Amino acid sequence: MVKADIRIELKHGVADPEGENTRKALELLGFKDIKSVKTVKLFEVEMDTDPEQAKEAAEEMCRRLLANPVIQTFRVDLK
Amino acid sequence: MVKADIRIELKHGVADPEGENTRKALELLGFKDIKSVKTVKLFEVEMDTDPEQAKEAAEEMCRRLLANPVIQTFRVDLK
């Protein structure tokens, strides 16, 4: 059994209004020193294969369904 | 400058319809061997402090704004 963390981030330069509004809200709550807040979508997928196949399958999942290549990048980490 | 990964997960037993529907969609696309898909909310917060303060601040952010303690747990990882 393999667990893959599939991390889907916005590409550099793509607006992240949720992150930006979270940063503003945290500042209003009194948190100083925050430079930026970025939101990331993470899928934790449990698979019943060996690690090598799991990584390949997870990357294929991103290409076919989970990520939008126009605005997002993805990274797969096995655990 | 410290980067904190704030990972907000649903507690065990809380329904995750987005994860469950993602699992179904992946299965329809032909991905076998998937046992489960869980969705996780991740905030990447950049702070201008030392690591110890950053970790404390990030945990306080979760308690005060980012996480709902009724259904979610959080974890802070510094990078």
Image (cartoon, coloured by chain):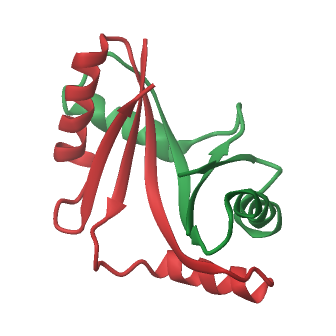
Chain colours: A green, B red
Rendered view: A74 above or below A59: above
Q: Which residue is painted at 37% across and 12% down in the image?
A: B48
Nearest the eye: A65 or A30:
A65
Relative placement, left or right, of A42 versus B67 is right
Q: Residue at x 35, y 60 (%)?
A: B9
Left or right position of B26 against B58:
right
Q: Among all residues in the image, which is located at the extreme front?
A: A50
User: Which is nearer the eye, A40 or A57?
Assistant: A57
Q: Residue A59: x and y, percent?
A: 77, 57
Quarter containing the C terminus of chain B: top left
A17 in relation to A44, above or below: above
- Res B26 → quadrant: bottom right
Instruction: Give the residue drawn at x 55%, y 54%.
Output: A41
Q: Nearer the viewer, residue A46 or B63?
A: A46
Residue A65 on image: x %, y %: 76, 69
Q: Quadrant of residue B61?
A: top left
How far across and how far down the image is residue A77, in percent? 61, 48
Please count the marks in the image: 0
Q: Residue at x 57, y 83 (%)?
A: B21
Q: Quadrant of the N terminus of chain B?
A: top left
Left or right side of B34 for A24: left
Question: On the image, which quarter does residue A5 sit in?
Answer: bottom right
